[in-house]
Amino acid sequence: MNVLIKKLQKSNKIALIAFFLVFLAYIVSLSFFTSSMLSLSGIETVLRFILLIVLYIWFIFYGLVALASLVKSKWKTFIPITILSIILIIMFSVGAYLIDVVYDNLSGVNNEYTTYTSNLINMRDSTFGSDSKIGMISDVDDIEGNILAKILIDKEKINNEVVEYDDYYVMLYDLYEGRVDAILISSNYTVIFSGEEMYENISDDTKIVFEYSEKMKNKDNELSSNKSLSEPFSILLMGVDSSNDGLLANQAFNGDTLMLITFNPSTMSATMFSMPRDLYVPIACRGNASAKINSSAASGTACVINTVTNLTDVKIDYYMKINFKGAVDLVDTLNGVTVDVEPPNYNTYNGQVCEQNSMREFGNKLICMDPGIQKLNGEQALAYARCRHLYTQSDIARNRHQQQLVEAVFNEIKNIRSFSEIEKLLEAISRNIETNMNTNQILSFYNVAKDLLVKSDNNLTIQKTYLEYYDLPVYMPGSGQVTSALGYYEASLDAIKYALRVNLELEEAKMIKTASFSYNEEYNPGVIGQGITDSSRKEVVPNFKGNYVSYATDWANARGINISVETAEYGSSNFNLNYGAGVIGNQSVPYGTFVSNVNNIIIYVNGSYTPQEESTPNEVGEVQSQDNPLEESGILPN
């Protein structure tokens, strides 16, 4: 060793310094590169380790050969291997940076911690005092509605009477009706409930009295799955409507957009099932009491997942929350997406499809597009995804548009070729998407993506579904309201469930033995579930008010329901001033009640109209309000 040191001391000092600098830079950069390479779990494992072995062998080779060249002054050997090592150092540094960019952005879609916030709110024109009655959710596992709500009560030293509720919608209705003076609710409540007609101005109607936030472990991460993305899996897409670029940190969210996708990487086939927001289904976290499916989101992600699982008989492996506002950024990053814009049914905007912009602004901010195949930018894509009022099928049409856009995004992603495009896409995803997939699970999708990009004969097949539905007005005893919901045909849902399970390889595909087609027409496998109806349609009690007795008795007798008729004299609680004598003015079982729950019904027929002289318009108005609160509010038709 001493001999070697002496010989090196006699060598060229500049070359010696260059050697040590390159040698040190090599080992440092290679260490960072090794760490980055090892983080790419499941991606070309054999190639990664072979490459690392070769690079470490070169490190040893360079150290030995460069030293020998310095001692013997063999510059023709020293200079080339030093230059090559410098090139490798640059490659290591760039490679480690690129890998870290990808990894960090992918890690950003799975948050270990999130901020949960509970608000105490009341109506804007009211005041909160010591005698105010407070509504709170009874579920002890509800972070924002119960756990943080109790902490807020203790922190603010609130000693008011607390009324517990099982349902957010009933609690909010009671706030509006004055049955409680304030309620404890997620700070995301304006986004959750503003989609309902009754609460569309909720941000102006209410005000925040107290607020409490706490950063906690993300409860949604408990919904993790060990399934690899290299085997068939299911994923639930949940649209989070926000005016901000980025996801709001809350347990609760609005569930207006729910799309279940099953994907089979071996067959490169996906099946998409969009669930209308008004679909009337059992809600898992409320003891399977039925309500609109979007209402499950008020209780958090787990409630939505369990509700969808019960509906479809498909275990949800993964979920993905997507911020609609961020969709603008995502589509613009892809330089637009190609979509066949569906013509509107209502000619409100001279045949164009128009919708408010991403900030929900109308007027000259309106986003419009012509029907037909075209490339949409981010604002147009979001407007098309939200648009429903111009179509007779409303939410069903919106679901159809969203399926189109998901397919269009997949098609554009396949065209990405440069890293700068990938980086921009990943940045948009990390800001606007949250999932329970960990980074390694996301990376395991690499092989699927490689097959899509490399193999020209391995195209992605997307099966679309359509759930046949019908209008279903439902009476809600908790609030006394009739809500406009959607029922569904079991046979249509069964066809969709079967397709989802076949794609997951949970059931064998049934062979179709006969088929006919024309070689002049493009083959279209059809939309699964469409056109399939059966006798499973739920029936509700109609609104008898304003009709004659014969209509009600014929209806009841046809269904084996006992019906009795009573006369309601003027001034009685069941007399209805909206109708004349001999006409049905009230009914014991409210309109919208499920027929399966009814055995008996009483029909109240208006008697003679003989008002007392002392009656005043105010008194008459009071009677009418007591008799028919639903009609007065405009919820029920006359």
Image (cartoon, rainbow, N blue to C red):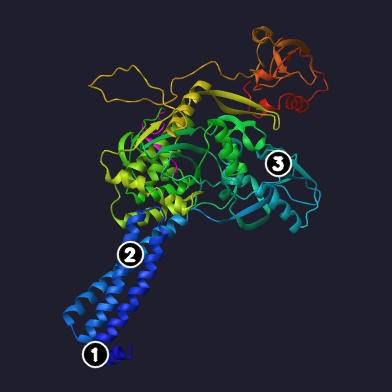
The quadrant of the picture occupied by the N terminus is: bottom left
In screen coordinates, is 61 left or right of 128? left
Relative to 25, say whether 168 is above or below: above
Task: Give 47 or 612, whichever is nearer the viewer.
Answer: 47
Residue named by callout 1: 11
Residue named by callout 3: 175
The dominant secondary structure in magenta is loop
Q: Disc 1 residue type?
A: Ser
Identify the magenta region: 346-356
Give the x, y percent position of residue 626: 75, 27
Disc 2 and disc 1 in contact, CB within 8 angstroms: no
Which label is found at residue 44? Answer: none
Residue named by callout 2: 53
Relative to 461, say whether 51 is above or below: below
Give the SS element for disc 2.
Answer: helix
Q: Earlier in the sequence, mark 2 or mark 1?
A: 1
Give the x, y percent position of residue 83: 23, 75
Give the x, y percent position of residue 214: 64, 58
